[in-house]
Image (cartoon, rainbow, N blue to C red):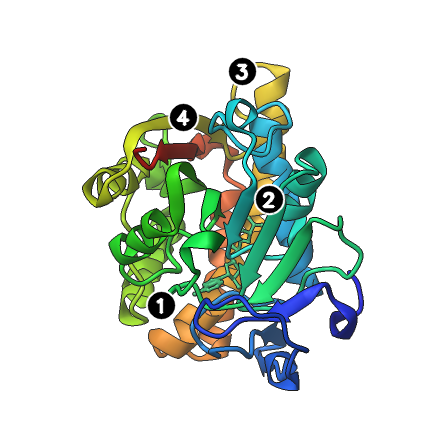
Amino acid sequence: MGDDNDSALGESIAGSLYTASLTSSVFNYTYENGRRYHAYHAGNYVLPNDEQEQDRLEYTHHLYRLLVGGASYRAPLLDHRPQRILDIGCGTGIWCIDVADEFPESSVIGVDLSPIQPSWVPPNCRFYVDDIEREWTYSPAEHFDYIHARDLIGFIGPWKQLLSHIFDNLKPGGFFEIQDCTTPPESIDSGLDLVPDLVQWQLKMFEGMAMLGKESPGDAYGIQSYMTEVGFVDTHVEIHKVPIGPWAQGNKHKELGLILQEHVSDSVEPYTMAVYTRALGFSAEDAQATVERVKNNIQKTEAHLYLSYYFLWGQKPF
Ligand SMILES: C[S@@+](CC[C@H](N)C(=O)[O-])C[C@H]1O[C@@H](n2cnc3c(N)ncnc32)[C@H](O)[C@@H]1O
């Protein structure tokens, strides 16, 4: 990662895009249980933003691309050549950088609570510190041809409100795409009986996130129906079921299964700590003990667990 203080970053207040030198306040990170968390609108987001978390996010990026033959999107962008692209909750910015390289004539903007994006980026790529749950104040001239969101489910308050902002800030004919995964994991048989700690943890996580004001709208179809309600048309859902562990037939599934098992295992601790300690009132020691039990369950290949990853996109009518 680049030097944070030398990033290709601007700061935006309430969505209005103006580039200013970053105030030091966005770097006043907070620390809990040995992990580093964002400073801008501190407490709004429960995962850390340190190097360890950035490595986890980059691993996820490759996992998503692996599912769809290396593509960054499923909406028909090649037919529409978007001029302005926005990635909300862009994390390390790795998706923006890939897409800026793929569409050098486009302007690609990534926004996030954390200024953790690198300095050396394609010239058509910019990052801004912003809170996407606040009012969006882009002018009509700044509206987008394509808005992208990945791995944001569970971290947003009312989803329908965010989808309305997205809809309003697309140009007519523009696309919105969300790439995410449905939790909790499922099993192809009665395997959930073998992983009671995982099942219990997932329920507690939903409870804790709700206490923090975040909505978990279920699977892709929950978000799809919200999209339709706010006005999107021609929505598509593409689902990829990925085994957790090397239990499925065929080399490709075995390899994906190993990758996902490691990824899910690495995700338990960052997901758990803030939710369990801030919202649910657990001590750090008890939260850590839960993490170990859940990680243990994830190693149970005989539970035949899988996660459903989805790509969902729709268009704003002309
Ligand atoms: C799980 S990470 C996914 C990052 C990126 N989309 C990816 O797929 O690599 C979620 C990101 O959303 C950001 N985020 C969460 N809530 C946000 C908000 N209200 N405004 C802006 N960014 C937010 C977090 O800071 C984090 O970087």
Position of residue 318 relative to residue 125, above or below, is above
Position of residue 136 relative to residue 69, above or below, is below
x and y, in percent, of residue 65 in the image = 61, 32
Identity of the residue furthest to the top in this view: 250
Question: What label does residue 238 carry, if any?
Answer: 4
Q: Which residue is mark 1?
A: 135
Relative depth, front residue between 2 and 232? 232
Position of residue 147 relative to residue 248, above or below, is below
Q: Which residue is mark 2?
A: 60
Q: Which class describes the residues within 10 Å of circle 2: few (<14), some (14-19), or many (20+)? A: some
The quarter of the picture where residue 22 lies is bottom right
Upstream in the sequence, badge 4 or badge 2?
A: 2
Q: Secondary structure at mark 3?
A: loop
Q: Amino acid at mark 2?
A: Thr
The span from disc 2 to disc 1 (Cα, nearest Å) is 29 Å
Q: Which class describes the residues within 10 Å of circle 1: few (<14), some (14-19), or many (20+)? A: some
Q: Amino acid at mark 4?
A: Glu
Q: Secondary structure at mark 4?
A: strand
Looking at the rendered image, the quarter that the N terminus falls into is bottom right
Q: Amino acid at mark 1?
A: Glu
Is residue 109 in sight in this rendering? yes
Of marks 3 and 1, the one in the foreground: 1
* Labels 2 & 1 near each other (Cβ < 8 A): no
Name the residue located 59 percent from the left edge and 68 percent from the top edge.
Answer: 114
